[in-house]
Image (tube, rainbow, N blue to C red):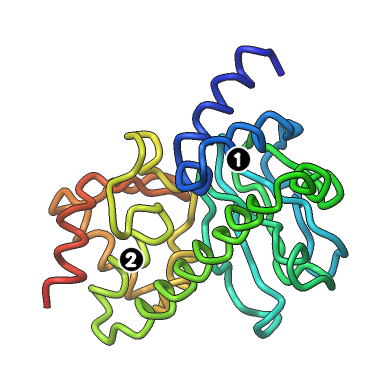
Amino acid sequence: MLKNDIAAYSTFLVNNGWLAHCSRGFAESFIAHCHWRHVPAGTGIQHAGEPGATVTGIAHGNALLTTSLSSPDSPSLHVMQPGEWFGFIPLFIGGTRPNSVVARTDMVLATMSQPEIEALLAPRPEWWRDIGSLGIIHANIATGIAADLMIRESRRRCAASLLQVADCRHADPLGPELASTPLSQEELAAIANLSRTSISSILRDFEETGLIKLGYRSFTILQPGKLRDLVDNV
């Protein structure tokens, strides 16, 4: 990876997602100590049951997160987007990782191992507050997913799931390219707890009214604000 690529990806991660909400000194020091990886689509990045923590940030690409905390046939829980971080749970409670993460597209990742994080924070224990804020972010995501799945009306629940997986449930995406999500209709149906037939009909209607654009195993949200209105203005 070229040095100027790393600089651009570092700037993106410091200014978006988790690190954008941390103290500036921590964010800049943390990203400066990260290692960088190119990961091809289909690669398993993290596997449930592995010991130790490796905090990983997505600078480019998308990944699917599944959890071992539910039944083995549970669908993907979350589509991870640029600016999101994962792999931190064993930092706080030890044990093994509860989630698996697989690259859906080619990705660029920033990583730091548990020993490296502990060494970085040893002289600055106040920075543990910044690390801890990752837990709040993930708790809010999980709570939002659970709340949206309780929506009874299928059209609104589908819209909410579209927004969730495209990371624009409560705000517009960071850029036009980030409104596209590599997810099949069958996968989206499982995430939204809808049948394949039901979701196909709803998605065709959303496309005809200009809310989304469907592609091959993908979709692009064209008007996230109108989709949010559909979900939230009851």
Q: Is residue 54 left or right of residue 7?
A: right
Is 181 above or below relative to 59? below
Location of residue 202 by image quarter: bottom left
Q: How many marks?
A: 2
- Measured as percent of width and height from the top left, residue 123 is found at 77, 44
Which part of the image, by quadrant, shows the C terminus? bottom left
Tell which of 45 and 72 is nearer to you. 45
Q: Is residue 45 left or right of residue 186?
A: right
Q: Secondary structure at mark 1?
A: helix
The residue located at (34%, 34%) in the rendering is 175
Q: Is residue 94 left or right of residue 188?
A: right
Report the residue marked by disc 2: 200
Is 42 above or below relative to 161? above
Disc ID at residue 115 = none
Report the residue marked by disc 1: 26
Q: Secondary structure at mark 2?
A: helix
Q: Residues within 10 Å of mark 1 (few under 14, many from 20)?
A: many
Tell which of 16 and 66 is nearer to you. 16
Type of the residue with mark 1? Phe
Type of the residue with mark 2? Ser
Question: Distance between the Cα atoms at labels 1 and 2?
Answer: 45 Å
The residue located at (81%, 50%) in the rendering is 118
- Measured as percent of width and height from the top left, residue 30 is found at 66, 38
The residue located at (66%, 80%) in the rendering is 73
Q: Residues within 10 Å of mark 2 (few under 14, many from 20)?
A: some
Location of residue 205 by image quarter: bottom left
| Sequence order check, earlier mark of 1 and 2 | 1
- Measured as percent of width and height from the top left, residue 19 is found at 53, 43
Tell which of 45 and 120 is nearer to you. 120
Q: Is residue 71 left or right of residue 183?
A: right
Which part of the image, by quadrant, shows the N terminus? top right
Tell which of 36 and 38 is nearer to you. 36
